Image (spheres, grey):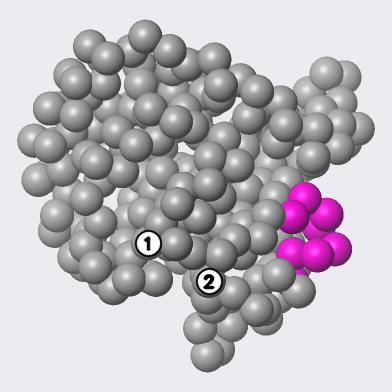
Amino acid sequence: MIREFIPKHVGNRTVLGTLDAMRRGEKNMHGLLRSNYANNRFAIRNHRDSIRRAHGLVEDQKNYTDMKFGKVTMAYAGCEVFAAGNALRTLTGRQVNYPKLIDRFERDGMILLGGFGTAPKAISEFFEECGYETELVTHIELFDSVAAVNDVSILTLYNDGEDIMQKVHTVCVTREKDGYYAHNVYCDGTVVGPCKTIMQMLSDINGGRSKGISLIGIS
């Protein structure tokens, strides 16, 4: 079945390359971006309390129906942007300006006007532009070794490794003294962890149905 074919038979590198090629086609959206930025500067006020309660992180993506990303909402397709924001917060300790961060990825990274989220390679490039070192891997066997030597990682996965219709999700993974924690996994405030390894984390998410696509180590 087509639902199983992509996660089971298409290589992760090919998936990332396809997403990156789709990202390159976004053009002529200046009016939309200006409108979204104005909207998001106002709407972010509705989320300041929840961000503060989560120690500066976003864990409740499902509540961001009032913030725009391309032609969709951040609740629908903002997981990569929130993963990048959570990583920034972890690395810098500073509050993230989400209207600006959203605008940044709308201009370089957004796929199909937001309908397919953001290309993972765009996240890696963004952190390199900010002066960080990154390592992007698509072989699941390398996930643990990369995460172990970086301050924070960004994990992209199939929600269900046997059903592409369950979509793709991206989360920020922080490395703490007692293990790894994944943020905004279920978009409802739940944090997954501590996990001893990234592989254990993947086996915990969605009852073990998830399957890794890529991991970006950032330091």
Nearest-to-viewer mark from 1 and 2: 2
Residue underneath mark 2: 219
Towards the viewer: 95 or 107: 107
Q: Amino acid at mark 2?
A: Ser
Towards the viewer: 204 or 39: 39
Please, what secondary structure does the residue beneath circle 2 have? Answer: loop
Q: Tag on residue 150?
A: none
Residue underneath mark 1: 88
From this view, report whether residue 40 is shown above or below residue 49.
above
Q: Is residue 186 visible?
A: no
For image coordinates 54% across by 15% down, the residue present is 25
Q: Mark 1: few, some, or many residues within 10 Å (few <14, many ≥20)?
A: many
Q: Is residue 180 visible?
A: yes
The outermost residue toward the bottom is 177
Position in image of residue 76 (x %, y %): 41, 30
Q: Which residues are magenta?
A: 137-144
From this view, report whether residue 91 is shown above or below residue 136.
below
Is 99 inside the magenta-drawn segment?
no
Position in image of residue 20 (x %, y %): 63, 30
Q: In the drawing, does residue 117 fall left or right of residue 51?
A: right
Q: Amino acid at mark 1?
A: Leu
For image coordinates 62% across by 57% down, the residue present is 216
Q: CA distance from mark 1 to mark 2?
A: 11 Å
For image coordinates 62% across by 48% down, the residue present is 156
